[in-house]
Amino acid sequence: MIKKISLVILTCIFLSPLTLLAGEQEAKIRVAYFRPEASILRRIYGNGFIQYQLDYSLNFCGKLDYFANIGYMNKHGHSIGEEDPTRLRLTPISTGLKYNFDFCNFCNGLEGYLGAGLTYSLLRIHDDSPFVIRHSGKNNLGWVAKSGLNFTFCNCGVAEIFLDYYYTEFHFSGVTSNNVVRNDLNLSGLLFGGGLGVKF
């Protein structure tokens, strides 16, 4: 646990000097539909989640950007079998690099990007059930792959559509209550959405 937190902190410290070389910067609010891969997760919480994000990026070398992102999801569901209420909250924090490219020669203001980075995710689960621990939480490292299109308007406005892939797993081995063991949780899946922000 301490090693993982230290790794995230060291990554941020390592990348912080990039701000000294910063060129153009962007700040955006993004909303995404998250489709989890795990069928058991869809059975409990439904087929999709809504995730809200704050996204920041800065250009530091040609078409290469550094990005930082924080998201939040809150989803209610019902356990398999007894149909007991359950709630899941996920806060992924990601940082990495993305490469921008011209989408087409005739599309002024339209630019594509591809990127990848590390994520550190905080998971909290609340269960209204006598058979499992009511409050449980895990934190874990993962990764994210990013793709999208940015459209610049009025010189400083930017609109975005994106498709990301988020990967992380949480292991609950050894967490028991009344001889019931909580299953490991795979929260990997696709994120599709849009965003709106400013360049400065």
Image (spheres, helix red, strand yellow):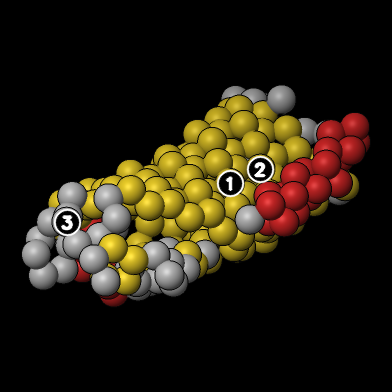
Looking at the picture, how far across and down is residue 139, in whole percent? 53, 54
Q: Quadrant of residue 17?
A: top right
**32 on left or right of 109:** left
Residue drawn at 48 percent across, 55 percent down: 138
Nearest to N terminus: mark 2 or mark 3: 2
Given the current orientation, which residue lies at the most extreme left position? 82
Q: Looking at the image, is 1 positioned above or below residue 15? A: below
Q: Which mark is residue 68?
A: 2
Amino acid type for the residue under numbered disc 1: Ile
**Number of marks drawn:** 3
User: How busy is the neighbourhood of tag 2: few (under 14 within 10 Å), some, or many (20 plus)?
Assistant: some
Residue 200 can be seen, yes or no: yes
Nearest to N terminus: mark 3 or mark 1: 1
Which mark lies nearer to you, 1 or 2?
A: 1
Looking at the picture, how far across and down is residue 14, in whole percent? 86, 46
Task: Report the residue marked by disc 1.
Answer: 93
Q: Which mark is residue 31?
A: none
